[in-house]
Amino acid sequence: MSDVATTEPILVASDVHAGYLPGINILNGCDLTLAENEIVGIIGPNGAGKSTLVKALFGLVDIRDGEVTLRGDVITGHKAHQLVERGVGYVPQSNNVFPSLTIRENLEMGLFLRPKRFDDRFASVVDLFPLLGDRSASRAGTLSGGERQMVAMARALMMEPSVLLLDEPSAGLSPANQDEVFRRVRTIRDSGVSIIMVEQNARRCLQICDRGYVLDQGTNAYTGTGDELLEDPKVIELYLGTLAKVR
């Protein structure tokens, strides 16, 4: 685990209400804080609002009440491209690469706002994901699911974000590829990027995160360090099941 900074949080969401349809909220008062150099995990049952929360943070779902701040500045209602410019990256769960483009071209798409910095950022990203440098001329559509996930994360890192939002990064991957994704998440954090990660593999998520939030019916049900939530009898009973006891 990282040493969580004692300074003001880098990102704060307070009493967030949001949804897709008029008059129907999926989020009903969510709170979340993210410190510098921290991994925050978000777990919970299907339909709890986990993905909606990260989409709301990234300006893809309208926030109807509540507030989100980034380094003390209110960013509630900002559009996705504005947040990218301010140092927030986002990796969606699906359709997160351009399959007809090469790896290099995918990474170029991640830096369309600052194309002159491509060589510098490409070198930095390849340090984190050496395979992408070796196969930069390969089309993304020929890659395995785990490799595509690496491309998606690398593309989000091209703009050198300070905050990275990950939506179900291990979804649909084999156990081996899931382990590789989680290792890469830690590597990204160690490079200086703070991470909020929604994850269906709740046990693995809590094992690698500094702090976790359990969402249920659009609100915070439990919060604590990853280790605290893994050991909490109620969290185990309601959300993790017997798998949580296999450490």
Image: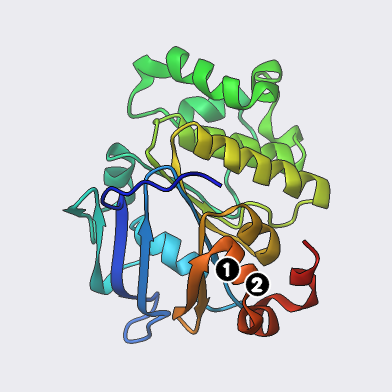
Asked if the residues shown at circle 2 and circle 1 are in contact, with their CB atoms under 8 angstroms apart, the answer is yes
Q: How many marks?
A: 2
Give above or below for 8 relative to 19. above
Kindly identify the residue that appears in the image at 67 percent across and 41 percent down: 183
Give above or below for 50 relative to 122. below
Q: Can you tell which quarter of the image residue 220 is in?
A: bottom left
Is residue 152 in view from this perspective? no
In the rendering, which numbered label is found on residue 228?
A: 1
Give the residue type that dot 1 points to.
Answer: Glu
Is residue 81 in view from this perspective? yes
Kindly identify the residue that appears in the image at 65 percent across and 19 percent down: 136
In the rendering, which numbered label is found on residue 231?
A: 2
SS state under label 2: helix
SS state under label 1: helix
Q: Viewer-proximal residue, 162 or 82?
A: 162
Q: Viewer-proximal residue, 186 or 114?
A: 186
Circle 1 Cα neighbour tier, 10 Å, few/some/many (<14 / 14–19 / ≥20): some
Give the residue type that dot 2 points to.
Answer: Glu
